[in-house]
Amino acid sequence: MPSRADDGSLTTYREKRKFDRTPEPSGDNEQGAAIPGERRFVVQRHRARRLHYDLRFEIDGVLVSWAVPKGPTLDPDVRRMAVHVEDHPLEYQDFEGVIPRGEYGGGDVIVWDRGTWEPHATDDPAKAVADGDFHADLYGEKLRGRFVLVRRGEASDREQWLLLHKHDDDAVRGWDPEDHPRSVLSGRTNDEVKSAPDRLWRSDLPAAAASVDLDGDAVTEPDQEALAALDEMGDHGTWQVFGRSLKVTNLDKVLFPGTDDAEPVTKRELLRYAATIAPTVLPYVAGRALNVHRYPDGADHKGFWHKSVPSRAPTWLPRWDNEAADSDEAHTYLVVNEPAALVWAANYGALEWHPWTSRTDEPEQPTYALFDLDPGEKTSWEEVLELARLHRTAFEHLGVTAFPKLTGRRGIHVWVPIARGPTFEQTRAWVEQVSRTVGAVMPELVSWKWVKNERRGRARLDYTQNAINKTLVAPYSPRPAAGAPVSAPISWDELDDADLRPDHFTIRTIGDRLAERGDLFRGVLYGEQRLPRLH
């Protein structure tokens, strides 16, 4: 079916806006392209001359829109006035920001709710709108159940409609949209968007990590005096970094063997890297228990997992008590809620940093679905890339936003940000189904055997990490190997780069990578989504 965007439906929208002055999308590209078999809706809380909520339904390639002054409600006894306004491009479903004063609709906008919807009692929702009697079942994060829009009077450019919620299982008497003021896209309020439109505010994170740069700028370094003091220090001393005092020792000890092209990496260099990368890593680890892989004798010696905060740790170190832990499990975990805590972990011998996929406020609720492309002894790098490209195709087909990164060893990890709701068991089942579908395309490369020596050297698409207290290494974490490689985020397009290698980036080179490309992983912080049903 041709898109209404192609027949002039967006003409009024474009005529009202000057796109060299407003950040709103023009609708000229495919950023918001329709997903086959899925209808989306979005509600934006918009403070222009007056506060109102914009309710938009994806119909025939555009967002058919109503302005609702008092906002939609789940209360079935309440009728809301709604004004039918111009169609908007599909790209608009992700718009959150500030429209400059003096421009059409000037004010701040957040994505207050979004999800999918299904028409009720019609196979032609566009005709239902034209007829003035539109029924829709909504599956959003805030709005759920059957909504009805009924036109009052004759059709006109700015039609008056009534919006109501049916008496169904999702109805809630007394439900007020103003009691739920935050964006489902970024967690920000309108005030936070207005004060910092280029920042993401994570209300679930501590203040040190809550404000995230949406532009993904290069790594932010700490006080240069602190780095200079570390460089000039002897083999041990007290280091002032990020406002904390750290007792550092054995600074000239080799922790990572050298390579043919590079000298060994000392503990001093690791601490310098941790201090430099901490502001970039912080949003990925803050508010989460951290499992660390310690190698106090260096990467060429056997390491061990460490989860409990030691009794001699400084009192300022952020931590979390897991009340659900069994008697033989760790109870008190490190939580890197400030950059100095990551430097402390590096000083403690943690060469790898593994955050939980759930947050400490809801440890049973994962916020990521994890894919681990784990090569076997006989798996070539090109074969790993082939498997990764198949995953890329699968995510595109499903309409799922996912973020790949090199493991820093031989494989590739993919993180899929999800809205809290599915259990670990449900998330693991979803990842398993996708993985088995991908693996069936190239069965000669994949083994599903749990025991490594039974896989005959083949790769494993490991979905089992989707469990409480199971982890994958954090982005930008070092890996215990020669040259100090790091787990580096990549773009999907880079899978086609002949020069890409899984351990290409190290603690010495990742800074240049960030300066050139920015943080390619930033999208996992504000790309929460619902996992689509699989058939």
Image (cartoon, grey):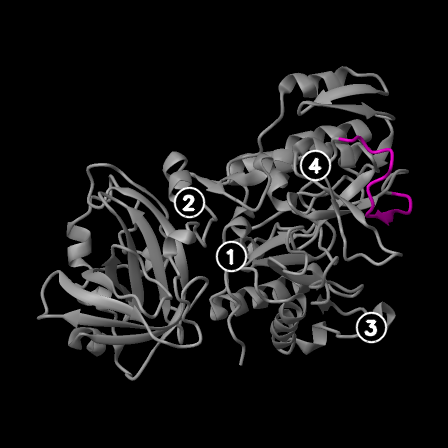
Q: State the extent of the magenta-drawn residues as a range.
A: 300-315
Q: Is residue 318 above or below residue 439?
A: above
Alpha carbon distance from label 4 to label 3: 33 Å
Residue 123 at x, y = what percent?
A: 29, 83
**Mark 1 or mark 4: which comes first in sequence?**
4
**Mark 2 secondary-structure assignment:** loop
Real-space CA distance between mark 1 and mark 3, rounded to the nearest whole angstrom: 37 Å
| Sequence-first tag of 1 and 3 | 3
Give the CA separation, mark 1 to mark 4: 29 Å
Give the number of the disc on residue 507.
4
State the residue position of label 3. Answer: 456
Asked whether, in this view, residue 334 is left or right of residue 495, the answer is: right
Q: Give the numbered dot on residue 189.
A: 2
Q: What residue is shown with label 1?
A: 528
Element marked by disc 1: loop
Q: Position of residue 386 (x, y in %)?
A: 62, 65
Left or right: residue 390 compared with residue 167: right
416 in magenta:
no
SS for tag 3? loop
Vertical arrangement, residue 183 with respect to residue 510, above or below: below
For marks 4 and 3, the one nearer the N-term is 3
